[in-house]
Amino acid sequence: MQRRFDHLPNRRAIVDRRALAEQIAAIDATGIALRTQATAILKEALAEGRAEIQRRLATHPSRGLEASNAQAYLTDQLLRVLFDLATQRLHPLHNPTAGERLTLIAVGGYGRAEMAPFSDVDIGFLTPGKQTPWAEQVIESMLYALWDLALKIGHSSRSLDEMVRQAKGDVTIRTALLEARYVTGDVALYDEAAKRFKAEVQHGTERQFIADKLAERDARHRKMGDTRYVVEPNVKEGKGGLRDLHTLFWIGKYIHDVQRGADLVEVGLLTKAEYRLFHRADNFLQAVRCHLHSVTRRAEDRLTFDVQREIATRMRFSDRPGKPAVERFMQYYFLQAKTVGNLTGVFLAHLDERFAARGRRFGLPTIRRRPDKLHGFVLDRGRLALPRDDYFSEDPVRLIEIFQLADLHGVEIHPLAMRAAARDAKLIARHRRDPRANALFLDVLTSPRDPELVLRWMNEAGVFGRFVPDFGRVVAQMQFDMYHHYTVDEHTIRAIGLLARIDKGELKDDHPLASAIIKHIVSRRVLYVAVLLHDIAKGRDGDHSILGAEVAERLCPRFGLSPAETETVAWLVRWHLLMSATAFKRDLSDFKTILDFCEVVQSPERLRLLLVLTIVDIRAVGPGTWNGWKRQLLADLYEGAEEVLRLGHKQRGRAERIATRQETLQATLGWEPARFDAFVRRFPEAYWIAEPDDVLAHNARFIAAAGDAQLSIDAQVYATRGATLVTIYAADHPGLFYRIAGAIHVAGGNIIDARIHTTRDGMAIDNFLVQDPFGRPFDDLDQLKRLKMAIEDALANRGKLTDRLVAKPAARTRADAFEIEPNVLIDNHASNRFTVIEVNARDRPALLNQLAQALFQSKVTLHSAHVATYGERAVDTFYVTDLTGDRITAPARLKTLERRLRTAASGETVEMAA
């Protein structure tokens, strides 16, 4: 038997096999009674062994390999005792024939001796030929006992011929058997199996096995999102996770028959330094997985928000100024995942040299042209390579130049050149101010080809972070929230990629306005540098926008930007959140919103730059963060601001705009003048400013169709806004809005915007934009039917709305992992006509309903509501007046209003108004 576990200290404290065997030998019973009593003893030993492993992991929380080896050792000893029990006492065989031999092997992760607390136990039973009745009895007894131990067993029973045949036909079985390890039973049979596997399965199939494993890896990466920088990574299956390390080991074992990771050095696949990185990543990821199983009490491999904080504490990460322990832990995690990616590239380069057919490479396209002027670099089968190993040390600026050439000529960089770049990256530190190096870097950043790809290569090699240390600080930096899907460096590089695609005109359908105005931007490089630097100060102690502007002022001159360009970049970084905050949280029909925004922006060029920066920043956050509603709001803000900045004032006054809207509506409706004038007189001026032309037309037709009805409800998909427009025409009464908001939630909808209007004859016409929980239009016919019924029930007071809201389950349980202190901001300067209230709170079911109820109880009139959601955080903005239509200014009343809203935001019951 291999001495696999000799490195484990005090193994008998985990499990004492001899003591267990003696206890079982002392049982005075036979058959099922014997098995039952023995299983009870083994169950107790399993629990004690697991507890001991947990104690050791708590004492040494980073020793992941030791913990996973200990788990495999514990399983080994229990199986050996159980095998002896089954073969010697339950089913003894006094005169065995040559065919009545049996071997128990560990396969898969268990065969590798790496198991987390709740990992599957993958075992195999081998027989020389067809399974005999005796072997069948032994296997059955063992499996029943293992199931009684509540272990999750993956098992197979094969003859040697079956083993060979199945391994040849199925790469998954072949991989599992590749890691087969003897546990107990007939040693000679195991040796024969190992010999036949090498001779009949492995030999001559190395190239096919490599291709199969790499294809399998690529498919797994696609399934997991194809990036190692997702903020809730899968420790086992995700890109840069344990399975990627396993794939390297499997290939090394298949080709060179290595038994341990360290053997990869001896066969030349890794250097000693690279193996140390391999071992460190393996040890850390194993530790994370063991803690993850322990915390969740199940076989869980996804590192979700709700467990990240606890595992960070278990692994003894601590808070630092501007960076909590959980973010430091996750940053270290992503750095290890990055290491795994780098090692994979180096590893594949060696395989490529040895096994790829001439002129071909594993899974990589071949270059179809030979570029000129490589400045001393060479081409190796279409990839940019070094003429000699010390080429970077001779002139460290070449560390930037190789990426610039790769971009310029559209070629890949040879993995061995990437390996040398990673090794020598530190040399670029002394050349950060070299004008040639900075000019080459700026060429890559502002490339009209594919800057995203080449910057990602530069980041993988570690050259990016060494050349721009401020960027190095955000490499693998996560943001502990549910809004951002990627680490800061990955988000930034994706944003640059989106900018390049808009610049090339590839996203005209998604971003028509940005695609049109980017042609009129004076300085492309200002925009690209601003996108690079917009989040550069994340993870520092302070406002990242203000700190980032300071970084920009320092870095831009080094990159070669002029003082004017530097000033613009710094301004963009400082205000990169302004446009989205204004568009999504403020009422754009209120002219003062536009004026306040323009006061900060000040020039049409800045407005153009800010719009494009805002778009790529939002879209690079992750899937689902961009939609038609956000596109329309940003376009509305841009057009309103552009008019003011171009003319110095609004082209038309309020009265002119209202008159134009009414003329357009009359032309659309085709109503006779008397009928139309009567309709117009029913509405206050604010109505004509607040709604766009298409909604005004929709409302007019809807109200006309409703006639004298006291309640009419309409719902239709509003495609340009990516939502469903829900319009309610009803007799106005106090509390109407909060009842409707609650009903929409009960029906499964999320309100993203609301406009509330009251006619001069006592009717309310309210327009809501509603999406489903995934940010899509609420358009299913059953959904719409349910929505209308819920609103009718709420307004007719059929059934208690509060009870139905409480009964509805929370949409996001993971949000409980975040601490968000409710905050209420009341502003009487943001509008000339309204008091503007902004509420920040944890997003949860019925939040808007509870806030609206607090406003109702405070006896204020609500004119519009704007809802923005950032992951687990909701920002709801309300435009209100008192009952006489004036802004609320009395200090005592403002204090009471703030207290009620804060109580509602925290989920507590709001007291009824007196």
Image: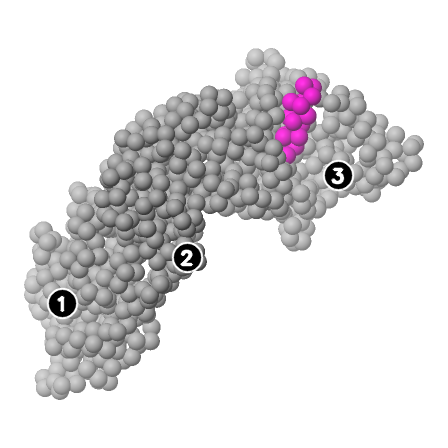
Q: Nearer the viewer, residue 146 or 370?
A: 370
Residues at marks 2 and 1, CA–CA distance in whole angstroms: 59 Å
User: Which quadrant: the C terminus?
Assistant: top right
Give x and y (percent) for residue 4.
13, 60
Residue at the (15%, 58%) spot, across then down: 266
- How far apart are the two marked residues, 3 and 2, measured between alpha carbons? 53 Å
Above/below status of 825 relative to 633: above
* Type of the residue with mark 3: Asp
Q: Which mark is residue 694?
A: 3
Alpha carbon separation for disc pair 1 and 3: 78 Å
Residue 81 image label: 1
Q: Magenta residues?
A: 635-649
Instruction: Assess disc 2: are there few (<14), some (14-19) or many (≥20) residues with their C-alpha within 10 Å of its C-alpha.
Output: some
Q: Give the side of residue 861 with respect to residue 699, left or right.
A: left
Q: Is residue 646 magenta?
A: yes
* Residue 37 or residue 722, whichever sits in front: 722
The amino acid type found where label 2 is placed reads Ile
Q: Which residue is mark 2?
A: 367
Asked if 495 appears above or below 659 in the picture, the reply is below
